[in-house]
Image: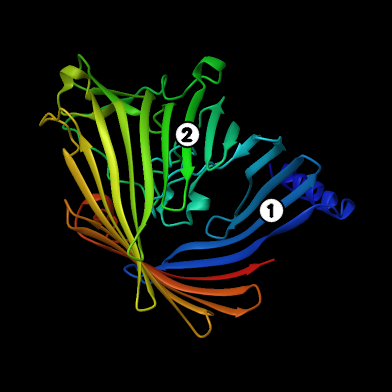
Amino acid sequence: MKRKNIIVFLLLTATIMLNAQIIHHGFVRTYIGALTDQDGEYSVLQNTFDWKLDYGKDDVALYVNPVFDYNALNNNLDISLRQAYMDIYFDNFDLRIGKQQIIWGKADGVFITDVISPRNLSEFILPEFEEIRIGTNAVKFDYYMGNSTIEAVWMPTFQATITPDENSIWSPKMMEFPMPVNFDYSKASVEQKLSESEIALKYSYLGSAIDFELMAAYMWDDNPAMHIFLQPDSTLLIKPEFHRLPLVGASFGKSFLGAVIREEAAYYFNKRFATEDLTFNGVKDKDYLHYLVGYDHNWFGVNVSLQFIQEYILDYENDIRNEEFSNTATLLSSKTFLNETLELSLLAYYGINNEDLLLRPKSSYDLSDGFNLILGSDIFLGEEGNFGQYNNNDMVYVKVRYDF
């Protein structure tokens, strides 16, 4: 594998040297993080080379984004293609073919209708969203009609959410069972064939007074449902299985008295939820609504963004493990100083149901042209919930980044 990675690197380097028409840019970053509650044990020791290559001629453009990640904690070098696609331009429409990130919606720091690209949650939600999103193999068609755009996406293959290793500090708390458990992974994958493709469609309008999007998709749930079967020997057999998940959604943004009001919602049909009732094999199908309301404004030179997010399970039953309503609030604020070379920011997530909190203060300073120094911390408060479960993972970090 290491030899293969080196060959890929040499081929890409040779391509750059032999073809001056290719434009290349990207960044090099060193990222060091330490846990504050464990005597400064390192949680991150990472060196990244993110390389973006662009080539265009006439009505065709090519884009390749290889990423080289060296993890000094386990001495592992990972080489991957975040994106690799070609664009073909016509008079009124475009085609994008290949591995690509597809970004929908208007939310900050949360996924509502932005569900086309799967996610890498191996480090929770701490990396940049560009690094959380996984490029998906797709054909994307955009048709332009004045201020309106129709976008259609076909994804011939399925990619599940990448979850943390069971020994990772970011591995979520698992359900507890009163008896021994065995697993059957025979249905824990989706066959790679045409009939298992995913499709999505979006209509968007961008106007001077308002912009909005309407979307629909016939996809797979990126996370498997855990079907539970009680066995004759009083053990439990758990079968993870992926299911289709149709959804519709909408989002809009509007300027109002110097501020921006945002709304985004996704309605899922027959989403599977874990239940304590084993007569239904531990899973029940319910329609599900996920939405947010956001407010953005600049107060005395400080950019402030507020969001209220709610998840609602319709036709709720008390044996479902999730709560009927799950509420979260977010705050993002930032201000620049020293001729915009220094930026101070705070991103906060508050889980209203469990009174848990994630605070992400950060300072970013431009040392010189292209060089950036980032100091920050991730602070988890609470005893349970999406953020409180990681209350031992408080971390301080430094990033040194050079963009070229």
Residue 298: where, in percent of width, then height?
Answer: 37, 71
Residue 222: where, in percent of width, then height?
Answer: 41, 33
Image quadrant where residue 181 sits: top left
Residue most toward the right?
18
In-image side of 144 versus 162 (left or right): right
Q: In this view, does 158 lie above or below 206?
A: above
**Observer-nearest residue: 232 or 296?**
296
Q: Name the residue under label 2.
A: 202
Q: Name the residue under label 1.
A: 52
Q: In this view, does 241 lie above or below 99?
A: above
Q: Can residue 149 be seen at all in this image of the molecule?
A: yes
- Mark 2 Cα-neighbour bin, 10 Å: few <14, some 14–19, many ≥20: some
Q: Quadrant of the N terminus?
A: top right
Residue most toward the bottom?
338
Q: In this view, does 320 lie above or below 361?
A: above
Task: Give amino acid for label 2.
Answer: Lys
Going 20% across and 52% down the picture, which residue do you hit? 384
Q: How far apart are marks 1 and 2 (CA)?
A: 27 Å
Going 41% across and 67% down the picture, which residue do you hit? 41
- Mark 1 Cα-neighbour bin, 10 Å: few <14, some 14–19, many ≥20: some
Q: How many numbered discs?
A: 2
- Using the image, tell me which numbered label, if any, was put on residue 34: none
Q: In which quarter of the image is the C terminus?
A: bottom right
Going 52% across and 59% down the picture, which residue do you hit? 73
Residue most toward the left?
318
- Which element carries disc 2, helix, strand or loop? strand
